[in-house]
Amino acid sequence: MYLLEEKIWFWLLLAIPAVILLYLGVIIWQRSAQKKFANAKLLKKLSPNRSYFKTGLKVLVVCFAILFLVIGLVNPKIGTKLETVKREGVDVVFAIDVSKSMLAEDIAPNRIEKSKQLVTQIINNLGSDRIGIIAYAGSAYPQLPITTDYSSAKLFLSQMNTDMLSSQGTAIGEAIELAKTYYNDEEQTNRVLFIISDGEDHVGESSNIAEQANDEGIRIFTIGVGKQEGGPIPLKRNGIVQSYKKDQNGETVITRLDDTTLKAIADGANGEYIDGSNTATVVETVQNLLNGMDKKEFEAKQFADFEDQFQWFLGAGLLLLFLDIFLLDRKTSWLKKLNLFNDH
């Protein structure tokens, strides 16, 4: 496990392309000025010891020196001690709709990205709850099992997209059934499932399945993403809209938020429906819901001690700068004797 303490210093990496551009500019200017003075063959005779290779090598060394110095300023830390700690929380599973209708842009930037933003912000504001993630479209797929590793959860979340499942539709019922297998702690009194979807094209008796889940102690809250007036489903290539999805009659498909279905599912599982249009409101609502629930104590492993590693990178950066001082623009004498850079 590692931590990056001061990520803001990464902005200094912009100095690397600046150095390269400056070097290329100087090279172009030098060659332009030299052509006015003499041709390349005459210049080679006038300065036989000049090494263009070492000039480029000096720039490369400086760039690596900047890289190592910046990493040193960021101060990476490595976890050295893993310990078991007692935590209290609720088991929370997020089931995220990744069907093609989630590409609609009636809510910015689009429904799927908005869903990921909502879940990310909820995770950022959690205390010590355990979380799991499910992706579903025409079928449900376990994305991340119950864990306390929020960093991994956000990493898996960022990689979710509408191409990850080939079967299309919105199998909310199958997602609920899969979520049941996530709650492996029989002593956990509060089990929560958040379904994030536009609710459209649902498959099966979702409300009945939700009631069955509630009988097993699972409360289901639904978050609606999209607008009732809806929007077309863009078909993009390299981020550029090529066309919009059409039905069998060649008409552009308009996908709309079906909050009726989502409300019915939430009502059937002792939960409630949440409008997902405002991120701050959603996060606050979820926080209040979870804070009002009884917490279950469980054991979790986490890194307790972290050791600084900045000294290695600062040392490497300073060493490269020191070496750069001794890298002269002239050819090395022993290389010159080997005649590697001269014509015979």
Image (cartoon, grey):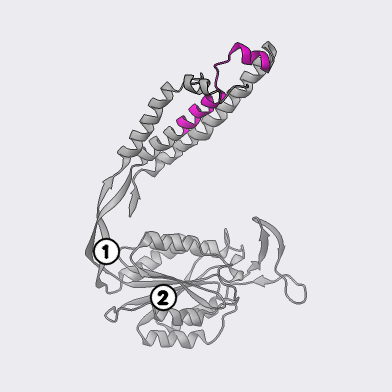
**Element under disc 1:** strand
Q: Is residue 285 left or right of residue 333?
A: left
Work out which residue is located at the far right of the displayed protein and give it.
Answer: 249
The percent coordinates of residue 124 (x first, y second) are 38, 59
Query: Residue 262 — which label?
Result: none
Query: Is the C terminus in the top left, top right, bottom left or bottom right quadrant?
Result: top right
Residue 266 in view, yes or no = no
Magenta segment main secondary structure:
helix
Q: Image height check: is 203 above or below 310?
A: below
Read off the residue under disc 1. 301
Read off the residue under disc 2. 193
Quadrant of residue 266 within the rendered picture: bottom left
Inter-mark Cα distance, 1 to 2? 24 Å
Q: Give the range drawn in magenta.
A: 41-63
Q: Image height check: is 139 above or below 51?
A: below
Residue 231 in view, yes or no = yes
Name the kind of residue labelled 2 in the image: Leu
> Which numbered disc, 1 or 2, marks the residue closer to the eye?
1
Labelled pair 1, 2 in contact (Cβ < 8 Å)? no
The percent coordinates of residue 20 (x first, y second) are 54, 31
**Element under disc 2:** strand
Residue at left offset 72%, top offset 71%: 246
Name the kind of residue labelled 1 in the image: Lys
Q: Which of 144 and 311 is in front in this view?
A: 311
